[in-house]
Image: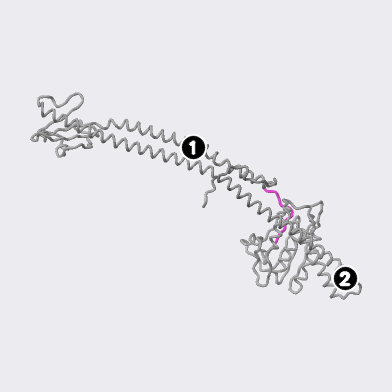
Amino acid sequence: MQSRRKLRFRLIVTFVLFGFGLSALFAVASLYVRAKVENQLIDQSLEADLRQAVENKHLHPEQPPHSDLIVVWFWSDRTVYQAPLAWQGLKPGVYDMRGGSDGMPQRYKLAVVRKYGLDAFLTYDISREDLGKRQLITSLVAAVILFTMLSLAVGYWLSHRVMRPVTELAQRLRAFRSGRQLEPLAPHFAEDEVGELAAALDDYAQRQSALIQRDREFNSDVSHELRTPLAVIASTTELLVATPDLPEKLHTRLQRIERAVRQATELTQALLLLSRAERSGPVDGETTDVAKVVAEVIDTHRPDVARKSIELRAEVEAQVTVEAPSSVVAVALGNLVGNACKYTQEGEIVVRVQGGRVRVEDTGPGIKAEDAEHLFERGVRGEGETVKGAGLGLAIVRRLCELYGWRVTLAPRAERGAVATLDFEIPAEG
């Protein structure tokens, strides 16, 4: 799982950890070097002092074996048994010893020299060095804490300096997203990594803008060009329908053509609307009676179920009026009802107009609850062996809902089939 922390926070933490690790490593190294060097110096000093005392004893036997600075014990080879038992078998050298009895300190160093028939011993109390060691450890801990706090301050300052260009770049991008006119980003930044990123974003934005502009122009041109032949077909069909003594079969077919032309015109207007870069759908003061649109949609799709054992009907439980073009409402409801007609082979399809919403209930194969949201994606179709399509209908409905602030949902029906709900009034959260 990738971290969701801000990059600036991660930079600060990294710098603090680096400063703490470096200072702690320095403290440990200082303690180790001090202990190593101090131990070597004491050993060398004790051994040198003891050898000098042995030489003096050999040259001047009458002198006492100690002074104010050094206390040495001398025994001959025959009397060494009088020495402490722990000392007797030691070879010449310096040893770390533990005492606590016979007047010896808890921890001490013992130098041993055997020369001229003398067994010489020199002790040094090292427990008194513990106080200095504790003071050094306290000082090093304080230094580690100080350097860690300094690393935090420096890391905070450096992260601010490092992230300032990135933050500025993000702010400019957010400003463009909020509706400001797009302008080049690269001139506002130095020729570094952030500048390269800004230049890459400029290039990407230019290519996307050109692509979007071409798409808008294409959609506008196609919509404009389609209006003329659709208008010709509509007017011609209207004249043919008005012809007296028209056979009933031909009259029915002309009505189907008329409904298809109306449906194509509405779909063309809706697609042209979706091709515009608007954050809300245009209303122009137009209101639409949803029940009337439902009746027209059902009349349009009734031939789709003519050869199936399906009852297609509308139930108006409340009067619903929305501020939107009737073509938009017709396209949204037409796709929902059309889907129900495609997937339902028998039973019924009921379009219920309720308070602030329309429910399309069918007795088809139904859907899985976990797949409902997935069906609104482009190119995704429901399961069905005899159903063909591009999987764009529900995606168009979702985009229209986003444009006008509506909500469309799919859910499995309790008995059998599916329920599509188009909410025109979404309650405020909270």
Q: Picture coordinates of residue 176 (x, y %)?
A: 67, 46
* Residue 427 lies in the magenta stretch: yes
Residue 355, percent from left and from top? 76, 55
Label annotation for residue 240: 2
Residue 409, relative to residue 149: is it above or below?
A: below
Pick the front one: 174 or 407: 174
Observer-nearest of 92 and 300: 92
In the rendered image, which residue does mark 1 sit on?
A: 152
Q: Seen in the image, is 19 located left or right of residue 409?
A: left
Q: Specify the label residue 296 is tagged with.
A: none
Mark 2 crowd level (few <14, some 14–19, many ≥20, 10 Å Cα): some
Mark 2 touches mark 1? (CB < 8 Å): no
Q: In the image, which residues are magenta?
A: 420-429
Amino acid type of disc 2?
Answer: Leu
Q: Decide if residue 108 is on the left or right side of residue 20.
A: left
Depicted 375 relative to depicted 27: above or below: below
Q: Is residue 224 left or right of residue 184?
A: right
Dominant secondary structure (helix, strand or loop) of the stretch shown in magenta = loop
